[in-house]
Amino acid sequence: MNGTRLEEVAIHEAGQRLDRWVARRRPDLPQGRLQKLLRTGQVRVDGRRARASDRLEAGAVVRLPPCGPSRQPAPLPEWLVEKVRSWMLHIDEAVIALDKPAGLAVQGGRGTGRHLDGMLEALRFEAAERPRLVHRLDRDTSGVLLLARSGADAARLTAMFRARAAEKLYWAVTAGAPDPPAGRIALPLAKRRRAGGERVSVDEEGRRAVTDYETLARAGKHAARLALRPLTGRTHQLRAHLAAIGCPILGDGKYGGREAFLDGMGLEPRLHLHARALTLEHPRGRGRLEVEALTPPLLEKTFRLLGLDI
């Protein structure tokens, strides 16, 4: 039997339904058994009974009761293990940093087949636990993604992300060039459910959201290459902020509509957003951890076609 576990909700898991959060933590648990544990109050949030539909907050502590023996997941094929390991940018006793490819979901969900969370066993190596996600990137965003190699390291890293102590640098190509070429976007954002899924929008009653931007190169008024530094961590913050100032990220039809595409230039119709670098204190006090991802082929090609090479 697995003993009772207390697990903290990571910052990237905020807003998830309790039943879906538990299902991701215990994919071996049959749905009927999960619903019974929730219905009888054996799963608790911060010591209190909770409903399956309750939305979780970052930092909440969830009690997972003994659930019976776990079914061991099928081993990953060797080719996939090698592929996942080829994404590594950094590894030490506490942290693994990956260069996540665009198009790969970080976690599973409705309609999601293969996802990174289901591949993390490939990165266990000799550790007692498999690595844990401590933040996330959108499916179509490439770049630096950090993993913790133990529960204690995950708690420390999650606390840093919650305190905004991690410095994030993104690169983006936009349809249109911002004016002024550098500045700060401080527009509150709120989630809204619409036909076709959830998205965020500027809303005076929304949550505080701040993004610093700098133009690195521009192709007249048609496009620009930007460095972005989000000072808060809202869902789709960069995409919503840039669309709000009239410069949607290239290929982002969800937030920019037709204006997010430049026709007749041979550009790929994909999201041009890349998590370039991440800097924060090492969770075991080993100084500053700085990780940088290479420029993906998508951006290299677009930089060249639009003359945004620097």
Image (cartoon, helix red, strand yellow):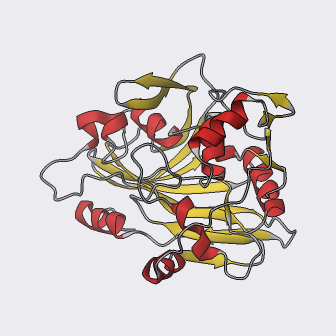
Of 230 and 95, nearer the camera is 95
Q: Is residue 11 placed above or below 284 in the rendered structure?
A: above
Q: Position of residue 109 (x, y in %)?
A: 48, 45
Please report the residue visible at 21 percent of the width from the left and 47 percent of the height from the top: 262
Q: Position of residue 80 (x, y in %)?
A: 45, 76
Q: Position of residue 8 (x, y in %)?
A: 78, 46
Of 197 and 219, nearer the camera is 197
Q: Tell me: 277 left or right of 150.
A: left
Q: Tell me: 109 left or right of 301.
A: right
On the image, which quarter does residue 249 sit in? top left
Please report the residue visible at 84 percent of the width from the left and 55 percent of the height from the top: 3
Q: Position of residue 284 (x, y in %)?
A: 86, 69
On the image, which quarter does residue 217 sit in? bottom left
Q: Is residue 173 placed above or below 84 in the rendered structure?
A: above
Please report the residue visible at 58 percent of the width from the left and 52 percent of the height from the top: 136
Q: Residue furthest top?
A: 205
Locate the N terminus by quadrant: bottom right
Counting labels gives 0
